[in-house]
Amino acid sequence: MSSLARLEPSLSTRPAPIPSLLRTTKSSSPAVNADRLDALKRSGIASGQPVVSPLDGAFRPANRAAKSSVVESKGILSALSPESLVASYVKSTLNPKTDAQMKDMVKEYFTTMQLMNADGEWAHPKLAAIGDKLLPANLTVDDFKALVDEMAENAGENPYIHEFLTRAQGEDFPELYAKLSKEGGKQIPGFVAYAMTLQNLTVAMREDHEVASACEDIWKAKSAAMGGAYKNIGFEGAVKYYSVEYPVSGMNAALEAGEIDPQFGRVILPVNILEAMAYDTATGNYDNVKTGWIAASHRPGNTPNAATGAGDTVLTEDGNGVSVNMPLPKDWADCYHAWNMAFVSQFEQFPYSIVKLLIPKVADYQDKPDEYIHTRALALYAHLNFIFFRSENDEVGASGAFDWSTPEMTKLFGEVNREKAEEYAAEVDRLNPSLPTRVKNAIVNFFMSIYLFFQTLPQQFGALAA
């Protein structure tokens, strides 16, 4: 039996609680922790819940001080990956839900995105033709749990994310922990339903570029009728919206024409990354800024490089996808994927933004990393339209409904990303050790260091003044 199956509650339909008995402090003695574990086991047996809460293992320093004496606790935690622990807790929040409730949430998301009306009618013939794939009639809670398992598995295959979650096990995030304890059971099923919505839609758009074009037509028409992005989501939101819509529209047009510019993505992709870097800089997440710079400076196109795999952008053989070839494509995708995840983790409602990265159609890129940018762009475009069209008083994802941002978590994520991104950059340089490349990288890194130094000055002076 898998670790996920072992963790899942089987005797209760309620979400697994986060037991206070396992909330140890760093100064707890082994004897005290052993007593807590015994009490926890008794309470777990009585309630039918897991002996160890998944979130205790993933986000709390569970029994660190008692490692030498509480062998059973250590065995339980060490046998499980942090991804599995988180997935087990997420799945437990689905236990109180019925198949109909989960399916209705997916329908609501499609309606919010303007792809379906309130009567369940699809907004375009292309969508109606695949309606059973977008919203299967036999969708069950088990399907949503299986999706969570896939998301966890893919997260574990990204070395940045796995390292972050592993280190997070030895850190305290009390604010996030408290929010999850209070709001997790209410909010998480909505995230999972949103994941199913984006997964099915992204799969459909990737399998048939005409579906992607149909969605683009719907969203452009609806957006124009509402006065455009600037009126509805402000200047910064509009900049991001159009900087994503532009390349997605370009890829759709290229797929329709059957040819694409070999240099596609060489400019617009770094521009998108730089937009996020500016925000990270403003919020002081300098480690993630450095990670973003490494991703932005390793671009596709230009002269093909057999040593690193970098080269032209081309269409896939099936005629429905775009292959964007970065230096060491799989390693670059690992870097970008984790960088963006850390970036969105500072938003109030970051689970909705992280979902677009965790869905299998985006995150299961290991075998075809060159297609990552295309599927990631499709999911992001759909997500931005969800943000654009949602009602201001809609609690699902509405501003102010919940805030799970945790600066300490974002900082740790950025630190891990920078360390591993520097390893990626060093490997690219090792495989491509030409003098011009070394000189260029040295110059770029020098000015980047100066830039980051000056960005930290206001904080340094502020600290001195205080």
Image (tube, rainbow, N blue to C red):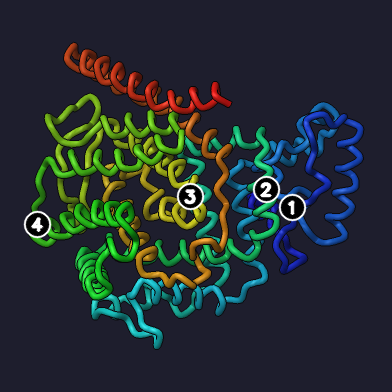
The reply to whether dot 4 and dot 1 touch (C-beta < 8 Å) is no
Of pointers 4 and 3, the one earlier in the residue sequence: 4
Question: Is label 1 in contact with label 2 (beta carbons under 8 Å)?
Answer: yes
What is the CA distance from the residue labelled 4 to the residue labelled 2? 50 Å
User: Residue type at mark 3?
Assistant: Phe
Quarter placement of the C terminus: top right
| Residue visible at 81% across and 61% down in the picture | 48
Q: Secondary structure at mark 4?
A: loop
Q: CA distance from mark 4 to mark 3?
A: 38 Å
Mark sitting on residue 258: 4
Q: Dividing the picture into quarters, in which one does residue 303 lie?
A: top left
Position of 163 compared to 263: left or right? right
Residue 102 versus residue 89 in the image, above or below: below
N-terminal label among 4 and 2 = 2
Residue tagged 2: 177
Q: Which residue is mark 3?
A: 347
Left or right placement of residue 385 versus residue 105 in this view:
left
Front label number (1 vs 3)? 3
Q: Which residue type carries mark 2? A: Tyr
Q: At numbered mark 2, what does the secondary structure look like: helix, strand or loop?
A: helix
Q: Tag on residue 18?
A: 1
Give the CA separation, mark 1 to mark 2: 9 Å
Amino acid at the residue labelled 1: Ile
Disc number lying in front (1 or 2): 2
Where residue 33 appears, as percent x and y from the top left, is 86, 36
**Residue 402 screen position, x and y as percent:** 57, 59
- Residue 199, disc: none
